Image (tube, rainbow, N blue to C red):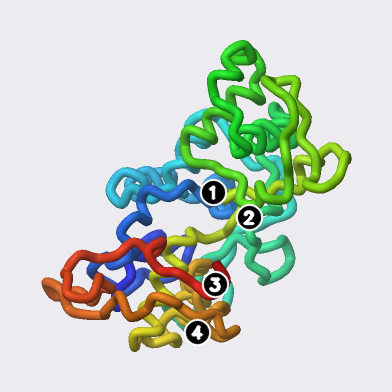
């Protein structure tokens, strides 16, 4: 298995990966960006990382995280709390010369998750209001309902994120009543108005779900779980880490019989049984679904 995790961003995510051919989930380049990873990349850029590296990766590999990080960087977004972090080499048995470059909490060797990073662009937006709009849209409100609010920077940002694929993952916890922008949103089964911070967005996740499921299918069909465990530790790949965690905790693929692991033009892929076309990770169904 040679996942297209070719994070040649060796100065940030670890040593150059030895995987030559991409074999990620078929739709990995279309997924919405991962906000924690975008913030991590912006921390690296603010602390001296090379923008050209990310710009090239965003263009050549169409990596959603690099693309969003460069968009924010070009718009002037910078890390506000830089004193909390530092860019440094840390010991890692998988890295070149036994070390890798990481963004860590200052004075420690703990790699940050990205959620700790405060951006200058955060200061111009009301994040709860943005989440409230995204929740409203996820509960069926048409985008056109917000046509009269385009002077509101929070609405504009919410609509931008919506168009880019940001969605609320737990809309079943809430219910909307009323019409138009005057409608109320409550916690389901109550008359308590929603706190938007309780919404969970797909952009909040530190990994693309499509990759996690693809990697789990690879492991279930004979791929090495140690391969993914190594990638998680060496290259700060959260999708690999999550695939290992779910596999070890007993998550089961309920439609595994539909797939096979095979060589196609010199690459190891997960395909539909009897086909040479690489699957999307979202074709994989889990017992937790």
Instruction: Please rate how many residues cluster around mark 3, counting C-alpha atoms within 10 Å: few if below 14, some from 14 to 19, many from 20.
Output: many
Q: Reading the chain from its start, which is encountered first: label 2 or label 1? A: 1
User: Which secondary structure lies at badge 2?
Assistant: loop
Find residue 93 and name its label. 4
- Residue found at x 59% / y 23%: 156
Q: Judge from the rendering whether residue 59 lies leftward or rightward of residue 120; answer left or right.
A: left
How far is the residue under mark 3 from the one under mark 2?
A: 16 Å
Dots 2 and 1: beta carbons under 8 Å? yes
Q: Reading the chain from its start, which is encountered first: label 3 or label 2? A: 2
Q: Between residue 159 and residue 235, name the one nearer to us.
A: 159
Residue beneath disc 1: 38
- Residue found at x 42% / y 43%: 67
- The reply to whether residue 161 is in sight is yes
Q: Between residue 174 and residue 73, name the one nearer to us.
A: 174
Find residue 242 and name its label. 3
Q: Reading the chain from its start, which is encountered first: label 4 or label 1? A: 1
Q: Judge from the rendering whether residue 170 lies leftward or rightward of residue 288; answer left or right.
A: right
How far is the residue under mark 3 from the one under mark 4?
A: 21 Å
Residue beneath disc 2: 114
Q: Is residue 242 above or below residue 184?
A: below
Tag in front: 4 or 2: 2
Q: Reading the chain from its start, which is encountered first: label 4 or label 2? A: 4
- The reply to whether residue 48 is in sight is no
Q: Position of residue 233 (x, y in %)?
A: 52, 77
């Amino acid at each position: 298995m040679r996942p297209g995790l070719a994070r040649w961003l060796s100065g940030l995510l670890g040593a150059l990966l030895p995987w030559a051919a991409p074999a990620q989930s078929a739709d990995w380049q279309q997924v919405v960006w991962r906000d924690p990873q975008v913030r991590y990349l912006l921390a690296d850029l603010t602390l001296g990382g090379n923008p050209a590296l990310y710009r090239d990766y965003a263009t050549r590999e169409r990596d959603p995280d690099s693309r969003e990080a460069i968009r924010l960087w070009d718009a002037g977004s910078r890390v506000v709390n830089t004193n909390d972090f530092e860019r440094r080499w840390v010991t890692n048995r998988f890295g070149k010369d036994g070390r890798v470059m990481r963004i860590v909490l200052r004075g420690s060797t703990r790699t940050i998750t990205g959620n700790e990073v405060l951006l200058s662009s955060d200061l111009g937006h009301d994040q709860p209001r943005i989440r409230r709009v995204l929740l409203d849209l996820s509960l069926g409100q048409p985008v056109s309902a917000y046509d009269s609010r385009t002077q509101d920077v929070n609405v504009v940002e919410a609509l931008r994120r919506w168009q880019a694929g940001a969605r609320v993952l737990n809309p079943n916890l809430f219910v909307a009543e009323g019409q138009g922008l005057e409608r109320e949103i409550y916690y389901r089964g109550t008359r308590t108005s929603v706190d938007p911070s309780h919404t969970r967005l797909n952009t909040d996740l530190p990994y693309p779900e499509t990759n996690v499921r693809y990697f789990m299918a690879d492991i279930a069909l004979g791929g090495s779980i140690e391969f993914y465990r190594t990638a998680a530790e060496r290259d700060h790949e959260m999708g690999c880490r999550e695939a290992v965690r779910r596999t070890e905790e007993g998550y089961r693929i309920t439609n595994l019989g539909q797939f096979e692991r095979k060589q196609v033009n010199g690459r190891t892929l997960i395909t539909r049984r009897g086909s040479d076309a690489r699957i999307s990770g979202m074709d994989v169904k889990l017992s937790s679904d």
